[in-house]
Amino acid sequence: MVSMYQFIGLIPLFPLIGFLINGLLGSKIKSEKIIGSISVLAVSLSFLVSTFIFFEMINLPTEERLKIVTLFSWINVGSINVDISYQIDQLSILMTLIITGVGSLIHIYATGYMHGDSGYWRFFAYLNLFIFTMLNLVLADNFLLMFLGWEGVGLCSYLLIGFWYDRDFENSTTSVAAKKAFIVNRIGDFGFLIAMFLIVQEFGSLQFLSVFSQASVIPSGDKILTAITLLLFLGATGKSAQIPLFVWLPDAMAGPTPVSALIHAATMVTAGVYLLARSSTMFILAPITMDVVAVIGICTAVFAGTIALVQNDIKKILAYSTLSQLGFMFLACGVGAFSVGVFHLMTHAFFKALLFLGAGAIIHSLHHEQNIQKMGGLKKYLPKTAATFFIAAFAISGIPPLSGFFSKDEILWKAFSSGSIWLWLFGIIGACLTAFYIFRLVTLVFNGEERFDEDLHPKEVPSAMTIPLIILAVLSAIGGLIGIPHFLGGSNKFEEFLEPIFKRANYQLPIAHDEIFMEYLLMSISVALAVGGILFARHLYLKDNSIAEKISKKYNYGYKLLFNKYFVDEFYDKVVVNPIKNFSDSVLWKKLDVKIIDEFINASGRITEYLSSLFVKIQTGVTDTYVLIFVMGVVLILLRMII
């Protein structure tokens, strides 16, 4: 019987073919339908192959599920041998299903959203290229191939954020936002690169299985392992937009909404979480790093959640929500619950992609209006969008039995059972903030009085956009059922499926409070606070904003602090960006470049010119002179030989 594993190369190949066809021939293909069909088909075929491999995997014994498929040799230098090889296991196939499954729905949605855009073919070429690079990132069996995909998604992010490069964005242009994302990510990528150098030096290999098997016997707390994991985490903070490298993600909303849904909600920003999960064997043996991961994660979750409370741009609110949810994923990884972090990664992909696509439908119906203060009463105009958006809002708020409830509640329980009451407490605060700001958004957009211009006549978006919303709504509703914990009567199939991956870490959480009663109590507190946040938001914003306005006026300084995002961008400009610019201008350019490098080059030119002026005197063009010089040369040579 032919194994589907051998067809793993087709998964990234299909999007690559789609990119090449649309990228090379798209400008000549006049039909949007053909361009969109090529792009959608490419990702859908990848999802189909992934599904076949997944079903074959679950029918295999656990010990036979891991396979390495080598496509061809890549680098062979000294003792370093790196192949283009894909590692098929429970974690990689799960990520592949998320990327290609959610990616297919977003591609379908984009065919309607981007209708009529002059860069239609270019947009879908970029989307397919992104899927190709992201699949290489999660399927790679070694750090170098992962890094290739890592850099590839960074490039695609730059191209897609700045897709409308000629449009204004926050007193600037989208191209500036794209450059910001690209540059900030380079900081994290530098950490990843240095980590790979240390891995080669320490383990003599970049292949996951080899590195992790050697790392597993190293004593916990080893300095080199701590350095490697901290550098890998630096890379993860850049790609997953955690403190302090989070500033690029809100500005990334300059790109088309399908880009926000695909890259900045469901796939690329979760690459950092995937890196930690894949490298769990090393991270578990570096307790200092684990503490850093947990603290940075929970700080980001609360920090971003507070900013989202007062923002008015619908996409910006969802962007800060993404930062917050990523913080919860890092919190889970930081306390050793890697499978729970990946579980929340999956459920987040469902409901956050739905929220972004729903926001895109709203923006589309209001002719690109994004200010929620200029919306209201849209429920009767966009019934399908409203219904699906409400499901996503309840899911992200952690309301049972929707998907976000199971994953977020499990994270809070793992944080509590790790022995740190503070991690749990701030996690509860972050969860309450989530419920409040998301229902502030929902209430101001779909309920209350109509605040949009009278000449706008919002209507439901085409079926190409509503069908993905409905499918994602179903996934947001039932996606968490595969991870029902044991104390609720479930078998937690999700954790059971991933258990062999994280078993290699040989780590058990220190359970300090394992009583079922305590789990029920903490779960009840979480749900009660989430419901309280929802009701409070509805109370403040349902009929009018008078109470909210009074609060904002009373706490004007705090409101301005949150509205201006704690002035972090201004701080970075003053402390980092402007000093570098000034140093580059006054020292590197005017002194080093102009006075030293340019002067050196100019001086070499002047010296050459002077020497040429000397030699040119003997270049008379007269034959007799040349004969005389020739004879003199012969005479000098003879004299030298005689003497």
Image: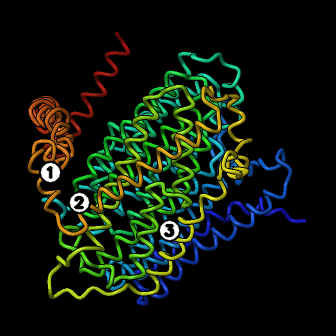
What residue is shown with label 1?
551
Q: CA distance from mark 1 to mark 3?
A: 47 Å
Q: Along the line of sight, which residue is nearer the eye, 518 or 65?
A: 518
Q: Please give left or right for residue 521 compared with residue 244 in the image.
A: right
Question: Mark 2 falls on what kind of element?
Answer: helix
Residue found 53% across the figure and 64% down from its top: 476
| Percent position of residue 391, x then y | 46, 68
Q: Is residue 321 above or below residue 188?
A: below
Mark 1 residue type: Ile
Q: Residue furthest right?
A: 1
Helix, strand or loop status at disc 3: helix
Of the residues under marks 1 and 3, which one precedes in the sequence? 3
Question: Is residue 80 visible in this depiction of the protein?
Answer: yes
Whether tag 3 and tag 2 are in contact, CB under 8 A, the answer is no
Q: Nearer the viewer, mark 1 or mark 3?
A: 1
Q: Is residue 632 above or below residue 639?
A: below
Q: How many marks?
A: 3
Looking at the rendered structure, the kind of residue marked 3 is Asn
The disc placed on residue 128 is 3
Label 1 environment density (alpha carbons within 10 Å; few <14, some 14–19, many ≥20): few
Give the CA separation, mark 3 to mark 2: 43 Å
Residue 608 appearing in the image: no
The CA distance from mark 2 to mark 1 is 10 Å
Name the residue rendered at 35%, 68% in the picture.
257
Q: Quadrant of residue 585?
A: top left
Residue 545 drawn at (x, y percent): 16, 63
Q: Nearer the viewer, residue 95 or 390?
A: 390
Query: Relative to 111, is 68 on the left or the right?
Result: right
* Viewer-side label of 3, 2: 2
Kindly identify the residue that appears in the image at 21 percent across and 61 percent down. 312
Which residue position holds label 2?
540
Q: Amino acid at mark 2?
A: Leu
